[in-house]
Image (cartoon, rainbow, N blue to C red):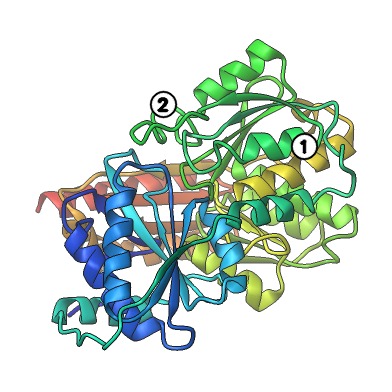
Amino acid sequence: MGKNKWFGTDGVRGVANQFPMTADFALRLGQAAAVLCCRRFHKAAIAKDTRVSCAMLEAALTAGLTAQGIDVVRLGVIPTPAATTLTPELGVDMTFMITASHNPYQDNGIKLIAADGNKFSDDITSELEALIEKNDFAAPESPGRVSDDTQALARYKEIALSTAADPQQLAGLKIVLDCANGCFSNIMPEVFERLGAEVICLGCRPDGTNINRDCGSQHPQAMLDKIKECSADLGIAVDGDGDRIKVGDDNGQLVKSEQLIAFLAQYLELSGHNRSRPIVSTVLSNTGLEKFVTQKLKLDYYSTPVGERHVVAQMRAQNGAVGGEESGHIVLLDYSHSGDALMVALVLAQGLKNAGRKMSRIFPLFENEPLFFENPRLADREQVKAVAAHPELQALLTEAQNQLRGIGRAVIHPSGTEPLIRVWVCGADENLVQTIGNRLLAKIRALAEN
């Protein structure tokens, strides 16, 4: 069996009630994880977002785990970053986070979080897939027990509040919060209000089918419009499971994630929290960010493959303080194990309050360099894999990278969740960037047709 048959860069995902997001698959995943991953505490936690299909998958995972003698603690509806933050203190071998993140409610997914709060490696998910396919599980004498942790959210909220030195740290700020009808619907407004902010809520009434629908980080226009309507200082939109953030300034203009990473790095450095620690982002981050970090802030900068897991791994290896990617995953390693929209929003708001200036006067901190970015859609993910690995495309990519050496980057990145190939070229020479981008795009389309 090939590696990562079902698991992508962020767990397994698909349409709810269709393979692999079926009760049967979740049952077998629970059994496989019980055998492979739950050997120390013989206990696992399960968390979920607000989708109607989460109950089905939670029940199936619970059945699979308990059938193998593993105790299950249900955390209820909590954000992914809360699950990664809390897992190390739960005394469990792992946590399952049932969510399709920013996808519509018809989809669902399962993210696997290890005992230390980090995501499992590709090797572990490959072993899990082999056990799921084999489907040969011996039943122990005694099944596991099920309990509910009703205090998990309260503990996470206290961690969030502890980011502020002053109980009224955000007094005087008017903030639009769009919670995508997801996991942060009840948490984020409460935390901001407790710190003194005036909050206008959008997307805070989940009904099981409205998660990410025309709201949240994937559809930030409502948030941007509300900023202008209410004369707010800023707006924050998150996705359904709360690991992704988009921010609007006081003029209702979207601020790019690389700009936010730059601001957070600068704020933490100037306030003494950073202590000259490196900044990490992915190969799909604008090359202007790297120049700002290395030339203006005089900090080390590391570039990783696409995916939050790679960013976090490099941050840990280099003792990085701030990391992230343009998709909206931003990691503050001193506050969270993963992208955490609440922690990022709180530190950002404190940095803005400290600056004493309107966001529109602060951003942009640097000029983005010319960028070519296209997402050609192919027939299916198998075709994506074949085209992305084709020798002709790889040869053209190598040639492009040689042309851009020292002045930019070219990246071909197959999406882990959709039949798309990202064509990304960025650098100081706009004509060269556009020429290379169009050449790579044309080659992908030609290979797809053949």
The amino acid sitting under disc 1 is: Arg
Quarter of the image that includes the N terminus: bottom left
- Say which mark, if any, is on residue 194: 1
Task: Using residue 2 as the reference point, say whether residue 273 is left or right of it.
Answer: right
Q: Nearer the viewer, mark 2 or mark 1?
A: 1
| Residue 363 visible (yes or no) | no
- Rate crowding at label 1 as few (under 14), some (14 to 19) or many (20 or more) other CA atoms within 10 Å: some
- Rate crowding at label 2 as few (under 14), some (14 to 19) or many (20 or more) other CA atoms within 10 Å: some
Quickly name the residue at label 2. Answer: 214
| Residue 23 visible (yes or no) | yes
Given residues 49 and 147, the one toward you in this image is 147
Q: Which residue appears at 63% of the width and 39% of the height?
A: 188
Circle 2 SS class: loop
The earlier-in-sequence mark between 2 and 1 is 1
- Say which mark, if any, is on residue 381: none
Tell me where residue 245 sits by quadrant: top right
Given residues 63 and 318, the one toward you in this image is 63
Circle 1 SS class: helix
Tell me where residue 68 sits by quadrant: bottom left
Residue 35 appears at what percent x and percent y? Answer: 32, 85
The amino acid sitting under disc 2 is: Asp
Task: Using residue 288 as the reference point, say whether residue 329 is left or right of it.
Answer: left
Q: Which residue appears at 82% of the width and 49% of the height?
A: 267
Quarter of the image that includes the C terminus: bottom left
Q: Which residue appears at 27% of the width and 40% of the height?
A: 106
Total numbered circles: 2
Residue 325 appears at what percent x and percent y? Answer: 55, 53
